[in-house]
Amino acid sequence: MLTLKITEDFAPSLVLNLMTSIVASVVEKKVALANETNGDLGNAWLKTRSASSGAYRLIAWKANESVSLEAHPGFRLGAPALKRAVVRHVPEPASQRLLLEKADADFARDLTPDQIKPLASNKDIKVESFKAANTFYMGMNLGYEPLANPKVRQAMKMLVDYDGMVKSFLAGRFFVQQSFLPIGFFGAIAYNPFKLDVAKAKALLAEAGYKDGFAVKISAPNVSPWTEISQSVQQTMGQGGIKVSIEPMELKAVISQYRGRGHQIAMLSWGPDYFDPHTNADTFVHNDDNSDTPKSKPLAWRNKWFIPDITKEMLAAAKELDATKRAEQYAVLQKKATDEGPYIIMFQNTNQVARRVTATGFDPGITEDLNFYRTIKKS
């Protein structure tokens, strides 16, 4: 029997969602301890094996090659129809496509748009789209004088061609979602108040004292789709008089600069740590110490957005026991972050999975740790 003592009055849904994430993975104690080495509680043994009660058990793991899973016949929801699953590591999308076309693979998860497009004419292959939970946004550092002005931030949110991007080079992979909670999460709202409006943006800039615009730097990862997104933003910001210079960097360099508040605008994405709205709310609006040496450095801190009342509202939502009221609280927080915050929240992504028509039921899940193999069937 497992006894868990919770010392804070958190919302039950928050606690349960935390327990379903990878940080609370449960293994069979007897099996783990039977394979203990030098007091490691079975850790080394578990690196290539499993001792759990899930739908599948790990039977082989070859680093950078493959993972082999075998169905657990005693699974509490019934034995999976697929008795064995092999997940292969195939870095090149072209190789994934070739394996799929030759029927040497049943599913391909990482095909590029160029790889997916020709598959439309292949009667043996179908492409499906699933919502993922990554939020693509720009973080504006309020320590840079123009960005500290709320009217400037409002104007900049109107100088992005959201629809134009998702209808062209982002088609099929992204959709407009301007709230910090991804659609599919409890409490998420489809709140998209901003669209490209150069005239209104220029009027706001004039009211803010920037009639002739200003210069600003955007730090962006030097890979697709960031390259294309940053170039589009540069072009539309220019229509409003804002002179954008793009600083392309490796992803880790952008993140490092961002964590140190060294950016003016950082273009990045955020993925939730667990399947509950608190994970993103805590990241996008929580800032209870705006000094240079806080205990934690969430996105609100990195962008110098310090609104203590919003932090209090976020903490209250985490402890709200009534699910309806809790959802309403997150709706308010999302609107405040979108309307007033230092973010230009743009898109939510989708996962495109190509499959053989003889294989159905695979669900990649909305978050990284919600992959479902037990629903797969082959004919």
Image (spheres, rainbow, N blue to C red):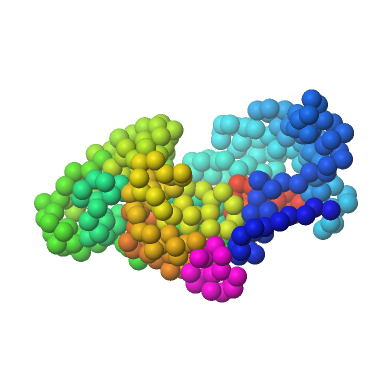
Question: Is residue 216 shown left or right of residue 328?
Answer: left
Identify the residue shown where x is 81% and y is 26%.
37
Q: Position of residue 319 (x, y in %)?
A: 56, 65
- Indicate whether 268 appears above or below 335: above
* Residue 167 seen from this side: no
Identify the residue shown where x is 79% and y is 43%.
27
- Indicate whether 3 appears above or below 106: below
Identify the residue shown where x is 41% and y is 34%.
256
Residue 320 is one of the magenta-drawn residues: yes
Q: Position of residue 348 (x, y in %)?
A: 47, 54
Residue closer to the observer: 260 or 105 = 260
Q: Quadrant of residue 312?
A: bottom left
- Indicate whether 115 appears above or below 5: above
The magenta region covers: 316-329
Q: Position of residue 130 (x, y in %)?
A: 58, 55
Q: Position of residue 18 (x, y in %)?
A: 64, 54
Q: Main secondary structure of the magenta part?
A: helix
* Residue 150 seen from this side: yes
Question: Is residue 300 shown left or right of residue 376?
Answer: left
- Indicate whether 305 appears above or below 94: below
Residue 352 is one of the magenta-drawn residues: no
| Residue farthest top in this picture | 38
Identify the residue shown where x is 76% and y is 46%.
26
